[in-house]
Amino acid sequence: MRILLANYDNDSALPQPCHGLAYLASAARTAGHEVSIWDAGVTHAPPEDLAQLVDDTRPDVVGIGVIGGWWQYRQLVALTNALRRTRHKPWLVLGGHGPVPDPTYFMRLTGAHTVFLGEAETSFVRWLEDPRGGVIPSIPTHPDALSYPAWDLFDMSVYTRTPYPRKNPTTPSATVLSGRGCTHSCSFCFRLEPGFRPRKAKDIAREVEWVKREWRVGYVNLDDELLVASAPRTLEVCEAIGSCDVSYMCNGRVNVLAGARGEEVLRVMRESGCVFVNLGIESLDDSVLREMNKRQTAAQSRLAVERCLSAGISPGLNVLWGSPNDSLESLDGIVEFLLEYDDGAQVRTIRPTTPYPGSGLFARAVREGKLRDVADFYERAHVNSDLATVQWTGLPDAEFHAALLDANTRLLENYHAKSLKRQTAELERLYSGRDTEWRGTRHT
């Protein structure tokens, strides 16, 4: 089979690597198929460019994967509308989070012949032996059994320059998955597969050494949902990756870092090269956290963040507002927390809670009559990730957005005030201390 996988334009000058397509391309190529990538994430080419490529090269299969979201939905519609106008009509397949909650709706919307549910490396390769229409169930594969992502099909001169927190702009970077899945089930989250499947620590380290060797990588984004799932697991990975001599960022659970071995875990993480850990803080109100099924407390969040900062690791403070039990008071608590613990590693703002299709919160919104179905979510309600789709504060949407405007204005003013202070200190070192290594305010 001749397969063309399409990556939509994510409207970013330095885009995030697309792991889903890279793994899928690797699986298909290993099975003997010819795979190419059309990557508008890098080229920003219009949908008509994909249509022209299809007519020129006449692939057997065109695959598009999308996550759930207003931008991705509109990109998918634009791409598939362009494909409807081609002279050559390839078999169109869809994958990713987006179509899974209602594949029939997405097939009608896009004209796709086949939709793959969940992880598709194994199911896609088997399907290629006997292509058929309809919905193809997932065949989860342990990540240790997968071939490395086919990054050679992507423009790594761009993807190795993706900006990450506390990364030197001139240091090449790459993403590596340390596992798949998560140990928890938060109400606002939609997961394709149940359970948590961590990779062997030695295999993670081998892939890190591979990207170092192939693309001179010095910074790694361990981009899966949960590296810090438990103290023993985290320490095992740190021991393996510590010999790789890279800086890295990862995602972690608050309750682990606030636990009995949290300080030990963070010390070892820092010694092994960790500079940034994303944390799902979500709220500083315990009643909201219970509604979210977060299985953590506000006190644990505060302790985890303080421990991160003490260890020299910047915490990623991810928060939401607009969930059940949220109020203006809970928003004030979020803002004060972010102002207190912002170390300037990255801009942090507050986004409204979004009940993405497939999540428990989406089911609640439907039960309560706030949403009708998946079509209603995408075609009417979800118009932007920074505007309310459905919110539970009891405030009119105008007041809800006014409160977010005030909160995010305060956060941005704080961030830029700290940036100004840092840059003026650099000027002081330059002119008073004759700092000959300084590279200028416009250097990036």
Image: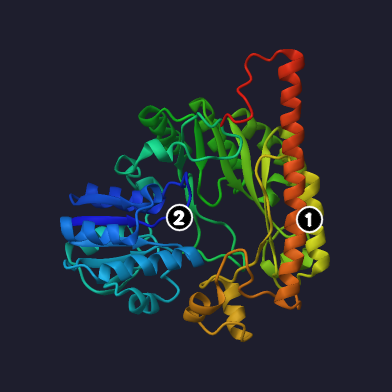
Q: Is residue 343 above or below residue 357?
A: above
In the displayed structure, 368 sits above or below 255; it is below
The residue depicted at 58 percent of the width and 30 percent of the height is 273
Q: How is the image coloured?
A: rainbow
> Closer to the camera: disc 2 or disc 1?
2
Disc 2 packing (10 Å; few <14; some 14–19; many ≥20): some
**Dot 2 amino acid type:** Asn
Q: Is residue 274 left or right of residue 286?
A: left
Question: In this image, 278 relative to 422: left or right?
Answer: left
- Count neighbours of disc 1 (C-alpha within 10 A) and say few if under 14, some if 14 to 19, many if 20 or more: some
Q: Is residue 201 left or right of residue 2?
A: right
The quarter of the rendered structure image containing the C terminus is: top right
Residue position marked by numbered label 1 in the rendering:
335
Residue 186 seen in this snapshot: yes
Q: Quadrant of the N terminus?
A: bottom left
Point out residue 353 in the picture as x, y percentages from the top left corner.
64, 67
Residue 414 at what x, y percent from top left? Answer: 77, 46
Residue 169 x %, y %: 53, 32
Q: Nearer the viewer, residue 98 or 73?
A: 73
Q: Which numbered disc flags the more N-terminal residue, 2 or 1?
A: 2
Badge 2 marks a residue whose secondary structure is loop
Query: Disc count in the image?
Result: 2
Q: Indicate the amino acid at tag 1.
A: Val
- Residue located at (46% from left, 47% from top): 15
Decide which of 300, 168 is in the foreground and name it: 168
291 or 236, nearer to the observer: 291
Residue 197 visible in the current orientation:
no
In this view, the residue in front, 294 or 319, is 319
Which residue is labeled 2 in the image? 10
